[in-house]
Amino acid sequence: MVTYNSNELNEVFKALSDPTRRDIIFFLKRGSCYVSQVRAYFPISGPAVTKHLSVLEHAKLITRTKIGRNVIVRLEENAIEDAKKWIEEYSTFWNKSFDNLDDYLKK
Amino acid sequence: MVTYNSNELNEVFKALSDPTRRDIIFFLKRGSCYVSQVRAYFPISGPAVTKHLSVLEHAKLITRTKIGRNVIVRLEENAIEDAKKWIEEYSTFWNKSFDNLDDYLKK
DNA sequence: CTAATATGTAACCATATGGTTACATATAAT
DNA sequence: ATTATATGTAACCATATGGTTACATATTAG
């Protein structure tokens, strides 16, 4: 079975599958910030935010850097490129995809 | 809380989060086919395939068309565009994202 | 008509997921 | 030194997820 799905890509898509995590990513697009700021912004508990950040970090979509008692969260650009490429590859060949159905419908 | 996540977009990302479903999508890129062909190709039970197809159909990534006792499965292109746009928007502004951190690091 | 084929549904199961509260730890402030 | 703040961990819970087997239904073939 041909698969285009590496473990890394799977982590990225899993991470992107939760709307709160996507919101966190967009929140971070405004700029890097402290975990405390993410916690303040989202209407979920602190530990819930920590979990989401851990998922995002594991997928390499963000990094966490401890500075004193604060932790800076920043976006990391490499990982999402894989997902981007996957989707682009998916849509690039789109219009070539229906030959079989067309053949069928001509019968 | 600003959200860029419509229900539709969420369905798409949820659908894409499973590696088997992504494999099904790539399988269908070869061309539209019968459900039976998808069932034959993937090493999971028939009902498992049916479930995956239902998720993909609900996310509007595929359509199912019943022809006699067969069902033709084909990719549908509109839905994934939303996910593509989301990711593109994410990466478009990437390099502008780190001003806050930069400010911090200059201190 | 009867048998075979294609597909989907029902019921069930183990594990994953996303959330919570309570607590631990480390650093900064007073 | 003591208190307050920032963050993460532990334990737990309800629900979602992806899988299975058994069965139902619809259509085609013999």
Image (cartoon, coloured by chain):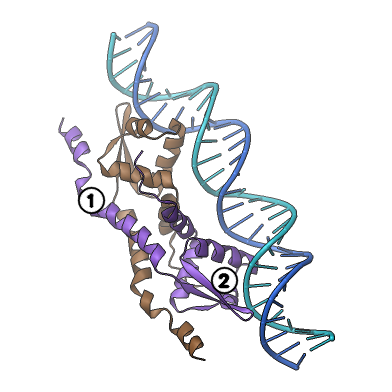
Chain colours: A brown, B purple, C cyan, D blue
Q: Residue at x 30, y 54 (%)?
A: A78
Separation of marks 2 and 1 at Cα, in angstroms: 39 Å
Q: Position of residue B11 (x, y in %)?
A: 47, 56
Q: Label 2, on which residue?
A: B42
Q: Is residue A15 above or below residue B62?
A: above
Parent chain of label 1: B
Q: Residue at x 61, y 64 (%)?
A: B48
Count of labels shown? 2
* Residue furthest to the left: B106
Q: Residue at x 33, y 64 (%)?
A: A85
Residues A86 and D16: in front is D16
Q: Amino acid at mark 1?
A: Phe
Q: Position of residue D8 (x, y in %)?
A: 43, 33
> For the residue carrying disc 2, how many other residues have a C-alpha within 10 Å: few (<14), some (14-19), or many (20+)?
some
Which callout, 2 or 1, points at the residue further toward the start of the chain? 2
> For the residue carrying disc 1, how many other residues have a C-alpha within 10 Å: few (<14), some (14-19), or many (20+)?
few
Q: Is residue B32 above or below residue A69?
A: below
Q: Secondary structure at mark 1?
A: loop
Q: Position of residue B56 (x, y in %)?
A: 50, 64
Residue C2 sits in which quadrant? Answer: bottom right
The answer to whether dots 2 and 1 both sit on one chain is yes
Q: Tell me the number on the disc at residue B93.
A: 1
Q: Amino acid at mark 2?
A: Phe
Q: Secondary structure at mark 2?
A: loop
Q: Are marks 2 and 1 in contact (CB under 8 Å)?
A: no
Residue A20 sits in which quadrant? Answer: top left
Q: Nearer the viewer, mark 2 or mark 1?
A: 1
